[in-house]
Amino acid sequence: MHWILKNPDGTMSYGLAVRGRDFAAAGGNFNNPQVATLVKMGKVKDAAQVVKIFTYPAQWDTEIWLTPNPKGAFATANPLVHPSTENAKGEM
């Protein structure tokens, strides 16, 4: 769960994220997220500061540089690397 705060000087800032499972454990609803849940969790002091609350889809961003690569150091693929479904097990 993510949120945007309005600062006292009128600028906006991106709030820290909170894990979905923690948000749900605090009684939050992903389909209808409420700022009150963030206040309850102690993530936000003043609900009036929150301009927007939203879910962000789970994703993984991975950048790995493996060498040597027979196709070259900056090739988009390395024929020597073989992905494993075992490594895909996790929180998502």
Image (cartoon, rainbow, N blue to C red):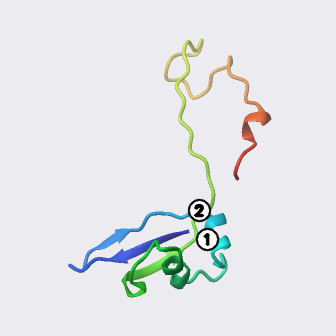
Instruction: Choose top left, top right, bottom left or bottom right for residue 18.
Output: bottom right
Quarter holding residue 79: top right
Mark 2, secondary structure of its residue? loop
In this rendering, would 38 be left or right of 50?
A: right
The residue indicated by pointer 1 is: 23
Which residue has dot 2 on it?
19
In the figure, 16 relative to 75: above or below?
below
- Residue 36, percent across and down? 52, 85
Q: Residue furthest bottom?
A: 48
Amino acid, disc 1: Phe
Image position of 7 (left or right of 17):
left
Name the residue: 60% across, 11% down. 70
Pointer 1 and pointer 2: residues touching (CB < 8 Å)?
yes
- Of 67 and 21, which appears nearest the observer? 21
Between residue 28 and residue 4, name the one nearer to us.
28
| Residue 1 drawn above or below residue 91 | below
> Label 2 sits on what residue type?
Arg
**Label 1 residue SS:** helix
